[in-house]
Amino acid sequence: MTKDFDIHHLEKMTVKELREIAVKYPHERAVSEMKKEELIAFIREVMGIKEEDTHKKKAKVKVKMTKPEVKAKIRELKQRRYEIHQKGGDKKEARYLRRRISRLKKLSRRISSL
């Protein structure tokens, strides 16, 4: 196996597959007793793969909103939800708006604690 393959796929491999790889290298402990994390650490050590060599997923950059913008959006969504209720309209749409309002309220609380 190539080093690139192991770097990208060790975490995704099953314990059985990791044991098959680990058996090929000399070791002090029985491979069958090792847990997944121990197997990954052992294989990385034997192959010379450093922890920082592994590629980590980049966090998605979220659009930043200020607290007044969030509050304005909440008011807008509440107004739309109120109009739907007055018309006796789509309950599915009203439920969707309620969830969006709830998420925005949580966001505004998080923003204020920063």
Image (spheres, grey):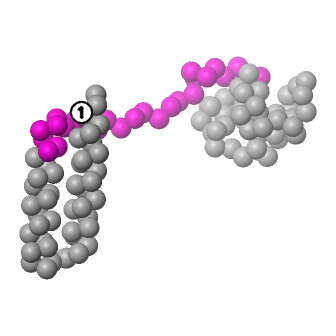
SS under mark 1: helix
Tell me what residue is drawn at x 90 percent, y 28 percent.
29
Nearer-the-camera pick, 92 or 85: 85
Nearer-the-camera pick, 99 or 45: 99
The residue singled out by tag 1 in the image is 112
Tell me what residue is drawn at x 15 percent, y 51 percent.
74
Image coordinates for residue 100, horizontal then vertical, percent: 25, 56
Tell me the amino acid under the disc marked 1.
Answer: Ser
57 lies left or right of 32: left
Count of marks overlaid on the render: 1
Q: Quadrant of the N terminus?
A: top right
| Residue 61 falls inside the magenta stretch | yes
Image coordinates for residue 2, horizontal then vertical, percent: 68, 32
53 lies left or right of 66: right
Image coordinates for residue 75, horizontal then vertical, percent: 11, 53
- Vertical placement of 89 versus 9: above or below? below
Magenta span of residues: 46-71
Can residue 89 be seen? yes
Can residue 21 be seen? no
- Vertical placement of 56 versus 96: above or below? above
Tell me what residue is drawn at x 66 percent, y 29 percent.
3
97 lies left or right of 49: left
- Vertical placement of 97 versus 47: above or below? below
| Residue 30 falls inside the magenta stretch | no
Main SS category, magenta section: loop
